[in-house]
Amino acid sequence: MLPALTLGFLAGLLLGSYAPFLPLTITALLLLAAVTITILEHRGALDRSIGHAAFLAGLVGLLYWTISSHPAPTVEGSRFFTDTPVRVTGVVRQPVRRFPGRAVLVLTDCRFGPDGIQAGVLDRVRVTWREADAAFLLGDRVALTGKLRAPSGFKNPGGFDYGGYLEHQGIEAVISVTGPGQVALVDQPATRSWWTPWRIVERWRERLRVSALHSLDELAAGVYLGMILGQSGYVTPEARDIYMATGTVHILSISGSHLGLIAMLCFWSIRGASRILPSRWLLILSRRITPTRLAAVLTVPPVTFYTLLAGYEVATVRSWLMIMLFLWALWLGRPNPVLVTLCTAALAILLHDPAALFDISFQLSFLSVLAIGLALPLTQSEPDLPPEGGWSIRDRLHTWLTGYSVITGSVTLATVPLVALYFNQIAWLGLVANLIIIPFAGFVVVPLGLASAVWGLVVGGDALPAAALNQMMCDGFTGLVHLFAHIPGSEWHVASPAVPMMVLYYGALLMLLVGRQRLARSATIPLVTAVALMLGWWTWSPRWAQDSSVVRVTFLDVGQGDATVVEFPEGKTILIDGGSSYDSLDLGRAVVGPYLWDRGIRRLDHLIGTHPQLDHVGGLASVARKFVLGRYWGNGIDREERFHQRLRDELRAKGIPEERAEAGLVLAESPSCRLVVLNPPRSEDGPSAGRHGPGMEVRRDGSALNNLSIVTRLTCGAHAFLFAADIESKAMQRMLDHGDALQSEVLKVPHHGALSSLHDEWIGRVHAGNAVVSAGPHNPYGHPVERVLTAYRDVGSHVWITRDEGAVWMTASIQGPGLQIHSARERSLHPVLPGSSMMVEELGNLTRVWQRWIES
């Protein structure tokens, strides 16, 4: 009964999330579900009580989502979303998340204005504080001044919708501040209040965080803080990539394996210690409590302490709930099926926070435990009585390895689509790596780290106790993961699977696991074949079937920066720039790479860094590391800044030299397309001249760098695309010498629409039918400038701005004049309101949902 209730409630929450956009469709689905359940009940295929309970749970879930979901900010609240800084005060609602150089706070009970008395407009605000110099606790009321923004993210085909994710978490506004003292304490809760125990825990966590950072190096501190305190933000992106490649990234945050191993270690130790007590003591003890019950009771405090110390995230609380239910069953002396425990934990978490349904951690962790619960019967084939003489070590090892293989294989099979969907990877190596990594973490690194944490809290001090030993264990742990990561093919990137294909996959897998005893061999073989074919297809992730007569150009949404992907009809791929890279976000890793993998692209024939500025080549280092490269083109100017040196280091590691692009060079050519360089001007001293520039003044002068950026023009049949990088009026004047060769059907507007790139004669000479501006929202430069946009519209250009449209992609046939243009904004769902056009609006949303599902 409980699994049916849980499944119905989950389905209801899912339907509830789509209710504003597909009300008629959801009503039809509910009617269809009611009819289907009724038919199955009449035929005796479904118990009446189970069917009714599941349907009722679905209705409750739908209603619960509708009631508890956070509505979009009202008009009154949205009026604060301006470029004018506003004073905000609010109460810290969640444990403050710490990262190198920044902290993230979630505030509730927010008040606005200079007097801080206007309340109830925006309930939950997310604050990013860079250069944070103070630690706040739960219940603290803090004040800051900054610009409030609506939650937003990058909008790209199949890309992660960060803005939507924040909205699902109930975040109604975001605000960023920089500098020490920018967030100030206003008030604290009473000494004895609801917040008191949580504040004590947060003080412990902050003391341990500071001690670890002072006592361990960067890599070891990242491992320690992630595995002991649940603060995985200190793990470097490079280290995270290695853990992801080996299928062990879950180790870096507190997951079920951590708590489960600690609980197992405590339970076995306590029960074993009680059994070796003197017989007299054991007799006295057994009159009151059995060793098993004693171990169950005494395991609760350390597991609970670890859960609190880890920041009680969703995955941690889920694991804690399951362990508590399991220990309760041991106390009662009753078997506690895994599925019942899982369902109880899921309902508890979703009743507290329905939005957890869309949390990656929730989905992966619950799916993993579900797979374990369904796979456990497959491992329980050992006879009840051991053979004469008992089980040998070899037999026990064989049994354990068999059970581990079945369970790990089941978890891998269950999570492959989700891992591919969210991370564009198939971590096949995890099957072997986890066999060694998980025990090492659970029985060595975590117990040692917890012991050091407890001892540090008891004795105090700035240093982490046993720091040298923790350093050595964390280094050994990291070294072991690095060893696995160097296995060829360990990092295997794939395209995100389409949602309909995922549904078919899980349906076939569920039939195999649940109905394996009822299925005939004739039905089993096709199901196994279907699962294997889908796994093979995802692993292969072939290049999207592209018409050999069609060229595709995609202007990605990378915020305030540039990244353009050009796909020739014959399959050749060119990437022009790769967006920016910050301490907290690398656009090459987060946006460009996933888009290319989703297109089935693993090789870039040409990589072009138009000029060495952060918003253009900052993300190219990650791209160079992850993809097979043909040739790299730059403008010959070197810079000492770290972002450019990272790129050059990656190119050097692959043995790819930087070639200088200059006017007149045919950079790429195929039977149907030709990419020609129009800027920078040809050097009289040869192609290598200018590598270190006309001088240091060029490298420091942003305008000079912009005017030497690489401009290319692509011609494919009757179509022409001009990629103008960041050139300004000086270079635009010089390029007028190209005459009619500038005219293009599509233009990437230079310099994000800056006023310095306004040149009326050049704009008229290009005379683009479509002008694409790559600019981010609320950028500090005011790009694009309205005067520039007007100039393009005056010559008949249709202006596309990635800030508003998201990614813009165009396909053109080389055999005709047709040009098809799409944007990520077209995929956005619109609320359906009652009225005569209700059906039309919903059909539009159904089309958008299908498009999003098949391109995911």
Image (spheres, helix red, strand yellow):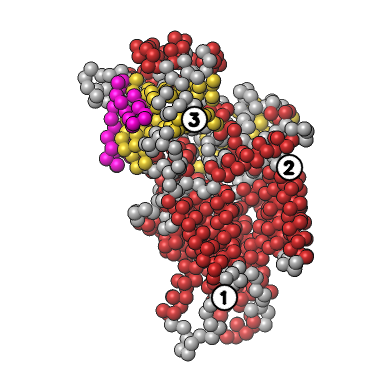
Give the mark nearest the N terminus, 2 or 3. Answer: 2
Q: How far apart are marks 2 and 3 (CA)?
A: 33 Å
- SS at circle 3: strand
Front-lying residue, 243 or 749: 749
Front disc: 3 or 1: 3
- SS at circle 2: helix
Q: How far apart are marks 2 and 1 (CA)?
A: 56 Å
Q: Are marks 2 and 3 in contact (CB under 8 Å)?
A: no
Report the side of 586 relative to 323 (left or right).
Answer: left
- SS at circle 1: helix
**The disc label shown at residue 271, or none:** 1
Give the residues drawn in magenta, as a range.
648-676
Amino acid type of the residue tagged 1 in the rendering? Arg
The local crowd at label 3, few if under 14, some if 14 to 19, many if 20 or more residues have their Cα within 10 Å, is: some
Q: Name the residue under label 2.
A: 23
Quadrant showing the C terminus: top right
Front disc: 2 or 3: 3
Give x and y (percent) for residue 488: 34, 54
Report the side of 551 relative to 650 (left or right).
Answer: right
Q: Is residue 797 magenta?
A: no
Q: Do the residues labelled 3 and 1 touch (CB within 8 Å)?
A: no
Q: Is residue 235 visible?
A: no
Residue located at (34% from left, 20% from top)? 679
Residue located at (73% from left, 66% from top)? 46
Give the mark nearest the N terminus, 2 or 1. Answer: 2
The local crowd at label 2, few if under 14, some if 14 to 19, many if 20 or more residues have their Cα within 10 Å, is: many
Amino acid type of the residue tagged 2 in the rendering? Pro
Front disc: 2 or 1: 2
Q: Are marks 2 and 1 in contact (CB under 8 Å)?
A: no
